Image (cartoon, rainbow, N blue to C red):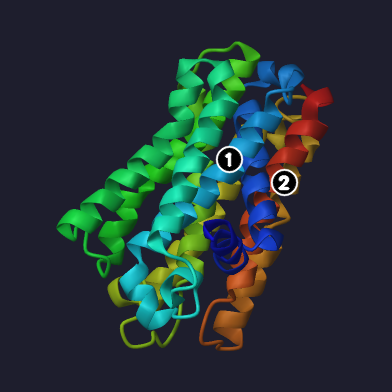
Amino acid sequence: MTARRLVRYLAGSFPPLFYLPYALSWALGGSALFVLADPHLAGRWPGRATAATAASFVVLVLLMRAVDDLRDLDYDRVHNPRRPLASGAVLPRDLAVLIAAGALAVLALNAPRGAAVTAAALAPLGYALLLLGLDLRRGWPPGDDLVFGALLGLPVQLLLNGYLGAGVLHDAGSAPGRHDLLPVLAAVAVFAHLEYGRKLTRRPAPGERSYVTAYGVGGTAAAALAGAGLSVVLGLLLTRPWAGGAGAGPWGWLLLAPLVLVAHGAHRFFRRSAVRWPAGSAALFLICTFLAYLAVALLGKDAR
């Protein structure tokens, strides 16, 4: 049965103990960034529609995972043969059913909020499916060109964060402005640390897709550290904790706390000469950073 195979897929490729905190922290923390960018939104967020945004976002992250697994199927059969799709425990048509059902769920959750929010919700999936179609029909972009693939995948990040911003602004009855650019850039920077950190290794396995083959170990490590640093700098620019009652007050300094995880990863990789940057530290940095954005947005309300 398709339903039984999809349960296997969730257990093997989308384990809830990791992906639910990951998606929910991103949804709520990413939304909080837009609140931090516009202090007038602080009193109107979160609202009842925030739950619809969070639920939609969990579904979207699941669908992005499914699309990525379909695109990486040939690679995973060699390098990750235990994954449900690569092992044959789940079939491509099962993921097609999952994607169709998920798209309908996102549509149902967002349609009452109007055409603009609904379009913003479905745009990331539409772009990801476009890339999947090009891959299946044309074999393009080449999966082994990790740098080019990352550039083509960047709009998915932008569109996902754009949906969070669209939801916040719509629910608060506000119009977008130039100040909404910093939240998107901050969120992308957080993911840059995860993207480069989890693929940072001194000795890539034969055929392994790693940025080290393009940038070298030092360049990849520098990119991972730059992503973490930039995310904190942009977050501090949004909260301005040094400015007394402006921004979110002294709560903004909480954004420095996740850097402890970056320091831990750097210590393991550089001082203890680990073969790989600890992926757990990179993943926890992302989750903790988004939770810090959320905490500052909520705790800083009285400072505005």
Q: Residue at x 45, y 77 (%)?
A: 87
Residue type indicated by callout 1: Phe
Q: CB atoms at circles 2 and 1 under 8 Å apart?
A: no
Quarter placement of the N terminus? bottom right
Looking at the rendering, which quadrant does residue 71 occupy?
A: bottom left
Q: Is residue 278 left or right of residue 50?
A: left
Q: Which residue is mark 2?
A: 292
- For residue 253, the mark is none
Q: Position of residue 182 (x, y in %)?
A: 51, 34
**Height in image: 285 above or below 39?**
below
Residue type indicated by callout 2: Ala
Towards the viewer: 5 or 116: 5
Looking at the rendering, which quadrant does residue 46 occupy?
A: top right
Q: Is residue 62 left or right of residue 87?
A: right
Describe the element under mark 2 as helix, strand or loop: helix
**Height in image: 216 above or below 188?**
below
Is residue 14 something one can see in this rendering?
A: no
Describe the element under mark 1 as helix, strand or loop: helix
- For residue 57, the mark is 1
Which badge, 2 or 1, comes first in the chain's sequence?
1
Q: Residue at x 45, y 72 (%)?
A: 199
Quarter placement of the C terminus? top right
Q: Position of residue 187 (x, y in %)?
A: 53, 44
